[in-house]
Amino acid sequence: MTGRSSLRRLAVQTGRVARQELLWLRRSWTVPAVAVLFTLAVVSVVRRADPPSPGEQPLTLLALVPDGDPLSTTAVVLFTLARVLTLFLPLVAVVLAAGALAGDAESGRLRTLQTFPVSRRAVVGGKLLARSAVVGSVVAVGLAAGALVSWFRFGTVDPVSYGLFLLVSVGLSLSLTGITVAVSTLTTARSRAIALSLGPLLGCAFFGVDPGVPTVLRTGLLVQPYQLLVAGTHSQLVAIPRVVSTSFPRTQLDGLALSDGISLWALCAWPVVLLRISAGRYRRRDL
């Protein structure tokens, strides 16, 4: 009973912190500005979505496989968006989440918050919950606008494939948000939190599509798991690791052969591990 009551008390405190954080974010210009910029970026990408020219080999872990059938416009849109979201989503997550605790510690607001009857774990959990809700909403709204533009331009959009793609992309954005909040918890300055989270995440976006990097390392760079999950959203999209393991079953892969389950695990592992470490460090910090 004691353990259950403790969890209930922690949940109540986390919800209280999350509500306060959302109220504070509503008064900030950052969220609407990022939402507008992200939506415009998605709309611009969808308007320029065209199938690759014959013989073109783009630097990506996704491939379009028409199998003699005409390419679906939804497949082309998803292929194009998935290539750029690996850069856009880290920017959105870092701008909206890097100040979660580091910004409050810098301004002194965090010390005031800890005078209320909430535990430090509830502070980390509440801020993570609020920032995840904001980032997920911004990404969902931007991609929904992309679906409308695709429908107006091409006259059709596959709601099932696009909806699954939206869910996978929101999942990646939440993973990146968790990593960013963890970094923000470990630092005491917003600028430092931005640098320490944005730099590695953009590095993941760059090296995650480099075929010269071993597969097992690309798995941990988040891009390859994301694009493999994207490949499952449409029949005309495939992920290169899956193609290799299917076409050449006797070939020894240079690392881990991914599956959807492993991809989901990879997207969850980084934020979970980092958040546990950062929450433990924060509980011992002298404010």
Image (spheres, rainbow, N blue to C red):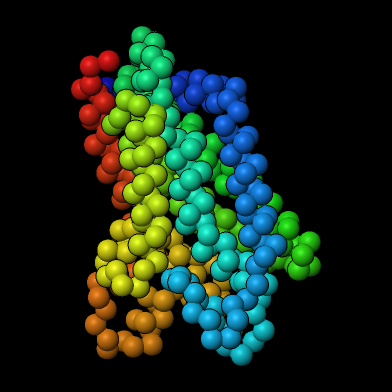
* 71 is higher (above) or lower (below) than 96: below
**Image quarter for residue 282?**
top left
**Image quarter for residue 249?**
bottom left
Report whether residue 123 is seen: yes
Q: Residue 258: percent from the left, percent from the top?
A: 34, 69
Report whether residue 132 is seen: no
Image check: 18 left or right of 182?
right
* 148 is higher (above) or lower (below) than 15: below
**Who's the residue at 44% across and 40% down the image?**
94
Q: Residue 111: percent from the left, percent from the top?
A: 35, 13
Q: Residue 280: percent from the left, percent from the top?
A: 23, 30
* 182 is higher (above) or lower (below) than 72: above
Quarter of the image with the N terminus in it? top left
Quarter of the image with the C terminus in it? top left
Q: Residue 239: percent from the left, percent from the top?
A: 44, 73
Image check: 58 left or right of 201?
right
